[in-house]
Image (spheres, rainbow, N blue to C red):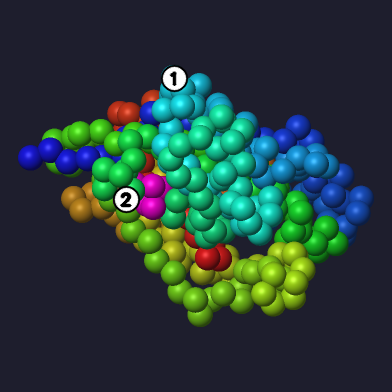
Amino acid sequence: MTTLRSVILGCGSYLPARIVSNDELARSVETTDEWIVQRTGIRERHVAAPGELTSDLALHAARAALANAHCEASSIDLIVLATSTPDQTFPATAVSVQAGLGITHGAAFDLQAVCSGFVYALQVTDSLLRSGSYKRALVIGSETFSRILDWNDRTTCVLFGDGAGALVLEAQEQVGKRDDRGILTTHLRSDGRHKAKLYVDGGPSSTQTVGHLRMEGREVFKHAVAMITDVIGMPSRLQATRPRISTGSCRIRPTSGSSTAPPTNLALPRKRWSSPSTATGIRPPPQFPSLWPTRWLTAASNGAI
C-alpha cells in the first residue's frame, strides 16, 4: 500500500549584504576576535540593512528555493514561515511573502519556536501535506535577530545574526518503506522548566515592548550538549555553535547495529558565520553535496521554544 511522503524538491537561502566582523564588534564591546573564535568558531555575522525586513529576507530565500526546485510560485498552496522576529505582531509575515510571490490561493501562516523553529515548521508542513489537504509547500526560516540583540552584551551579540532559508516540499506517493524518499519521521519535544535560560525580556502582553535577547550561556551550553547526545549517528545538520557540536558529538549514541557514531557524520553548519536562529542549516553541507535525494539526513535543533 502506498503512502504520501513530503519530498524535498529544492532549497534556497539568503544573507543580508552587510557583514559585521569580530574586529568591528571589538570596537564597541569588550571582546576580541580570538575570544569569540575560540569559544564559538564565529568570525562574522550578517546584519539586515535599515528597512530590510524579515519578510524581505524570506522572500529572497523563497525565490531561490523555487528556482532550485524548478517550480513556479503559483504551484505553491501552503507557506509555513518560522520566525521569532516577525515584521509585525500581525498579520503573519508569511502572508507578506505570499503576496510578494504573487500567490493568491492556499494558506500562509507563521510559527514561532526560536532556534528549533525550522524543525517544528517541517513537522507541521509534513503533517499537512500527508493529510492530502495541500500538494506543494514552502517552508521558510527567516530572522532579523539583530533587532532584538543588546549590542552592549558580548555574551549574546557575538552569537547571532540575520538570514533566511527555505525548502520546497511536495506530497508524493511512495511505497511506504524505509527506503522512501521524503520525510520519514519527526520527533519534537519541549521542557518549559528551562525557559529562563534563553528568552527575550519583552513582549506585547508583558511589557508592551520588543525587549532584548537574554541568555544563561553556560546553562544553555550544558543543556544543548545533553540534547545533542540523543541525535542518531547519521549525517546530521545541527543548529549549534561548533564547540557545542564538538562536545556533543563525542557522546552521540550509536545507531542500532553500529558500534560508533564518528564526528565525521556531523555536518557543521557554521565555521564562520553567527547563528540566524530559525534560518540556520538549510543548504546541503559541503561534505554531503548530493544529500537530497540520495542520502539520509537528521535535522536536529536545540533552543528556547
The mark tally for this picture is 2
Residue at image point 38% right, 61% down: 188
- As drawn, the label of residue 70 is 1
The residue carrying pointer 2 sits among few (fewer than 14), some (14 to 19) or many (20 or more) residues within 10 Å by Cα, namely some
Residue displayed at 72% across by 35% down: 16
Residue 15, position as x, y percentages in the image: 67, 35
Could you classify mark 1 by the number of other residues whose Cα lies within 10 Å: few (under 14), some (14-19), or many (20 or more)?
A: few
Instruction: Give the amino acid at mark 1.
Output: His
The foreground one among 109 and 264 is 109
SS at badge 2 = helix
Quadrant location of the N terminus in the rendered image: top left
180, above or below 249, in the image: above
The structure residue drawn at horizontal position 80% and vertical position 62%, both measured from the top left corner, is 150
Q: Is residue 264 above or below residue 229?
A: above
Q: Main secondary structure of the magenta part?
A: helix
Distance from disc 2 to disc 1, alpha carbons, whole Å, reads 24 Å
**Residue 145 placement (x, y as % from top left):** 70, 52
Q: Quadrant of residue 152?
A: bottom right
Q: Which residue is nearer to you in this view: 263 or 223?
A: 223
Q: Which image quadrant for residue 272?
A: top right
Q: Earlier in the sequence, mark 2 or mark 1?
A: 1
Q: In the shown orientation, is residue 8 left or right of residue 91?
A: left
Q: Which residues are magenta?
A: 122-127
Q: Residue at x 33, y 29 (%)?
A: 293
Was residue 123 drawn as part of the magenta stretch in this picture? Answer: yes
* Residue position for label 2: 127
